Image: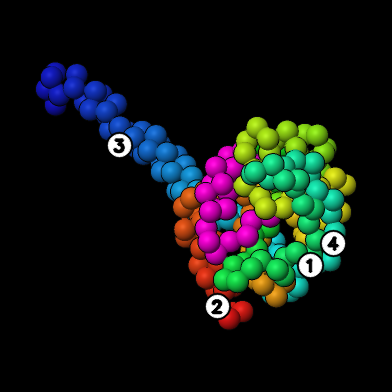
């Protein structure tokens, strides 16, 4: 071996691990991207991967009667309360969408503009249930954020939420005109989730009661 070979050999050996070093950097990023994509998919589809599915799907909504959130509808009329009987009277060609929300819920703020657009869907009667909220706070929320609901009940103690199997707000349910719950969406709604998930469920619910 020449003197030049002797001097350059250690340098070559030092550079050899470079591909492995790049792998160490790239692999965690790839894993993170896959996990981020998975959780984004779950968020868009509705639901926490660790949550159990609702046992109420395919069953009649639990009986309840709630006083109204002390707010007003567009036009100034007083907000109606909400009961199980109201879910079975959405009007011709409509289903009821029940949205559990709260003024203290950060993710409810995220979905609120989507709810206002959803309320304009002619297939939908959108109602709300203020979950474990104070009357004044819930009313202020609707006044400041805009009221997408045609009726909103105040579940101040959370009893109705327990009966519905609510894990945490926001949660949204599709209810057929016969009062049967056909879908539960966990987490904040987005426009994409409405198109990809809620829209087809609404169509299925309408078809089932024709």
Q: Which residues are drawn in magenta? A: 108-127
Return the mark for residue 19. Answer: 3
Say what secondary structure mark 3 lies in.
Answer: helix
Q: Around disc 2, counting alpha carbons within 10 Å, would you say few (fewer than 14), some (14 to 19), or many (20 or more)?
A: few
The residue sitting at 58% across, 39% down in the picture is 110
Task: Identify the mark nearer the N-term, 2 or 3.
Answer: 3
Which one is in front, 173 or 1? 173
Task: Identify the mark nearer the N-term, 1 or 3.
Answer: 3
Give the labeled residue for mark 2.
207
Task: Identify the mark nearer the N-term, 2 or 4.
Answer: 4
- The verdict on residue 117 being magenta is yes
Q: Position of residue 179 (x, y in %)?
A: 72, 71
Say what secondary structure mark 2 lies in.
Answer: helix
Name the quarter where the N terminus is drawn.
Answer: top left
Disc 1 from disc 3: Cα separation: 66 Å
Is the residue 143 above or below the residue 196 in the image? above
Task: Identify the mark nearer the N-term, 3 or 4.
Answer: 3
Give the labeled residue for mark 4.
64
């Amino acid at each position: 071996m020449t003197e030049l070979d002797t001097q350059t050999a250690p340098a070559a050996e030092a550079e050899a691990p470079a591909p492995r070093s790049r792998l160490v950097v790239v692999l965690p990023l790839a894993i993170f991207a896959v996990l981020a994509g998975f959780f984004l998919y779950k968020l868009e589809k509705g639901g926490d991967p660790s949550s159990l599915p609702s046992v109420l799907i395919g069953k009649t909504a639990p009986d309840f009667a709630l006083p109204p959130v002390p707010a007003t509808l567009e036009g100034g009329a007083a907000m109606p309360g909400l009961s199980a009987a109201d879910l079975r009277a959405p009007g011709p060609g409509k289903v009821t969408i029940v949205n559990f929300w709260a003024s203290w819920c950060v993710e409810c703020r995220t979905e609120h503009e989507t709810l206002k657009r959803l309320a304009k869907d002619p297939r939908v009667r959108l109602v709300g249930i203020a979950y474990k909220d104070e009357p004044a706070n819930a009313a202020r929320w609707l006044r400041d954020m805009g009221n997408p609901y045609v009726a909103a009940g105040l579940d101040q103690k959370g009893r109705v939420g327990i009966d519905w199997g609510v894990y945490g707000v926001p949660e949204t349910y599709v209810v057929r005109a016969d009062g049967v719950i056909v879908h539960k969406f966990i987490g904040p709604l987005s426009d994409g989730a409405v198109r990809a998930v809620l829209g087809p469920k609404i169509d299925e619910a309408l078809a089932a009661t024709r």
